[in-house]
Amino acid sequence: MIKIGTVFSGIGAIEHALDRLEIPHKIQFACDNGERKLKSSIEEITSAVEGMSDAEKNAYVTALYEKECGDNQVEKTYRANYKIRNDSFYQDVRLLDGRQFEDKIDLFVGGSPCQSFSIAGKREGLDEARGTLFYDYARLVSEIKPKVFIYENVTGMLNHDGKRTWSIISEIFDSLGYHWAPWVLNAKDHGLPQNRRRIFVVGFHDDFKECFNRLVMPNSIPLKEDMITYLETNIDNKYYLPEKGFLRVVDPKHKKHVALNGKIARCQVACQQYNWYGDMRFESEVPQRLLADDRVYKGYYNDAFGVARCLTPRECLRLMGFSDDFKIVVSDQKMYRQVGNSIAVNVLIAIVNQILMTGIFDNNGK
């Protein structure tokens, strides 16, 4: 039984990877604020929870988030799909004390918000508030002392600020008491038709040096299926585009932001499908129900008559490696965002398989 803990947990990519691998595991804790921003400062909260037990602090912070920001939609999706105790889901990584889980976690996984390092963001890195959340991830590794950690982020982290950001991050990883290796892996090299390139840092506690020496980077595998295999049939009318959306996605000047009928999906992002952004589909076979729907625009693309549509949330989940038994319990807009913020499950499966082959989870791993 592998005991796992996650931060920036999202919709549970590592949890789903372990489910798909049918590996027995227990979720000790998860943590995600659902992209909600508190009005209260971290200093005010820290002062208010001083002297509280971990359970009392968690209850206080949860209630504060609900009062100031409403429900946690990410937590709603997470709880619908995984078994976790009510008091084991935390709202704010900055307020999570890892010492309560010291030596109780086999696998610790997380990827701090990537906007600080991505090409799409302002790239203010460690000087920007979201960038500093990396420090909380590192702090928790130091406090929890898991056997293994996996850290994920965008590859922009590697060259940000003339590579100085990565130099600082590397120094922090070096200071944690772990042997670690950075791997750049792409979802399209691990069975998913999506061009999603990310850096994964895999760390083994110093006590397991022999296991770490057996760790090798997963090999790429040939991509056997394109996006068409992942598409649903009988798509609801609501996913088909009105005139403004149709004319936007078929216009070549928008090809930087729109891919029409691609075989390999562009990297899914939090804002995908919003304002007709990302991967779209043009269909030349138009059923009567769409012909009769005045909202759905019918027009021409490459001299063919047809309709255009967004991807559905289920299709986006499939392209990230989530099985069809994954429950969708939030609105489409929120689901698109949650999927775009997740980690490609197939890549995590490849990483976990490499970790398992080292024997670190066999008995005492030595």
Image: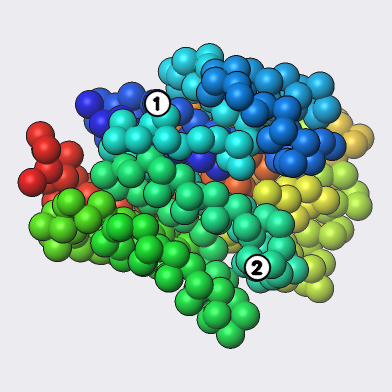
Q: Is residue 16 visible?
A: no
Residue at the disc numbered 2: 125
- Vertical side of 289 occupied by 255: above or below: below
Pinpoint residue 110: horizontal percent, then vertical percent: 47, 46
Q: Residues within 10 Å of mark 1 (few under 14, many from 20)?
A: many
In the image, is 176 to the left or to the right of 76? left
Residue at the outermost bottom position: 162
Placement of the N terminus among the 4 image quadrants: top left
Indicate the amino acid at tag 2. Gly
Pinpoint residue 255: horizontal percent, then vertical percent: 73, 69
Pinpoint residue 209: horizontal percent, then vertical percent: 16, 58
Helix or strand or loop: what does disc 2 sit on? helix
Helix or strand or loop: what does disc 1 sit on? strand
> Of residues 188 and 311, which is closer to you in this image?
188
Pinpoint residue 302: horizontal percent, then vertical percent: 73, 66
Q: Residue at x 38, y 31 (%)?
A: 101
Which colour scheme appears in the figure?
rainbow
> Of residues 80 and 25, which is closer to you in this image?
25
Indicate the amino acid at tag 1. Gln
Q: Residues within 10 Å of mark 2 (few under 14, many from 20)?
A: many
Q: Is residue 114 visible?
A: yes
Q: Residue at x 11, y 57 (%)?
A: 210
Q: Are marks 1 and 2 in contact (CB under 8 Å)?
A: no
Q: Residue at x 42, y 35 (%)?
A: 99
Q: Which mark is residue 28?
A: 1
Q: Residue at x 40, y 67 (%)?
A: 184
**Label 1, label 2: how many angstroms apart (C-alpha)?**
30 Å
Q: Which mark is residue 224?
A: none
